[in-house]
Amino acid sequence: MSVQPITTWILAAICAALITGIAWRFRALAPSGVIAATMMGTVVVGTGGWWPGIILVVFFVSSSAISRIGPQSDHQARGAQRDWVQVLANGWPMLIGCLLFGFSENTNWLLFGIGGIAAATADTWSSELGRRSHAPPRLITTGKVVQTGTSGAVSSMGLIASFGGASLIAILLGISSIGAIWPVVLAIVIAGFAGGLIDSLLGATVQERRYCDHCQRLTESNPHRCGTSTRIVGGIRGINNDGVNVACAFTGAIIGGISGILFL
Ligand SMILES: [Zn+2]
């Protein structure tokens, strides 16, 4: 078992509180998200070390910044203010991975966490930048042209953004002191990109699809950003974007963990 010294825990808690406090000021986190993200950041650094913490911060800051560029999206209406559910839906593999690394000292658990974050980054970047695409997106399952913002829709800009987000996390792993070799770094790119694709695939199939009668638009949120409650027009009731994000992060995490078993 290896956990960081108590001074690291304290320093990590101070850094996490500062960053999440700033995020709250900029309305990127709801109060429950501040608490969840502060605890997550502290435990991740305390058990996994500083590099997993840095990777977590880069995911969080880049995703929050990207969702602020350009016109408002549905995600922002529910809040660019991420709540504790959204924080955990994206970050759980990193939290679990670092905790298990602390107990086992097995680096594969760190790669499990980093693969999960690569997927979360790829997914957030692609959904936020993809909806800025001027070309209409296509449904990943049928290739049919659909409205921007439709769950499961992909565009070339979204796919490039997904690759970019995954690559950024992989590069951080490459320069980190975690000691990953290039096949593992490459695997993290694949982990992130695959997680993004799974997110789209589940978004197109099982995720509940909602419709706002007021705006006559498909949406993921309820109520819609206009305040009207939305009705389900497809998918499975109860499987929302958070549930799909859990699966997206899991896909990246599994690929990241397996890459460690294969190559390290
Ligand atoms: Zn509406």
Image: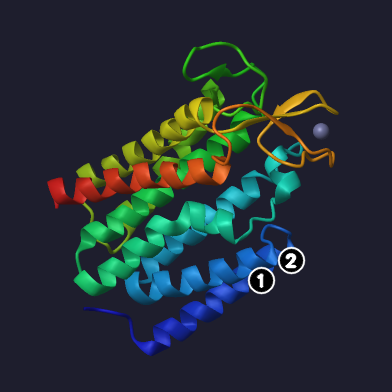
Q: Residue at x 61, y 74 (%)?
A: 18
Query: Please, what secondary structure does the residue beneath circle 2 have?
Result: helix
Q: Does residue 119 appear in the picture of this structure? A: yes
Q: Which residue is mark 2?
A: 25
Given the current orientation, which residue lies at the most extreme bottom position?
A: 6
Q: Which sits in the foreground, 185 or 124?
A: 124
Which percent across, then down, holds residue 262?
Answer: 14, 46
Q: Residue at x 55, y 58 (%)?
A: 87
Q: Residue at x 60, y 29 (%)?
A: 130
Relative to residue 80, is residue 193 drawn left or right? left
Q: What whole-number distance in Å separates the C-alpha atoms at marks 1 and 2?
A: 6 Å
Q: Amino acid at mark 1?
A: Gly
Q: Is residue 150 above or below residue 53?
A: above
Q: Is residue 124 above or below residue 38?
A: above
Q: Which class describes the residues within 10 Å of circle 1: few (<14), some (14-19), or many (20+)?
A: some
Which percent across, then down, holds residue 255?
Answer: 28, 43
Q: Which sits in the foreground, 220 or 107?
A: 220
Q: Does residue 171 appear in the picture of this structure? A: no
The image quadrant that residue 175 belongs to is bottom left
- Under 8 Å from ligand 1: the CB of mark 2? no
State ligand 1's quadrant: top right
Where, quadrant-wise, is the N terminus in this rendering? bottom left
Q: Which residue is mark 1?
A: 21
- Residues at circles 1 and 2 in contact by the CB criterion of under 8 Å: yes
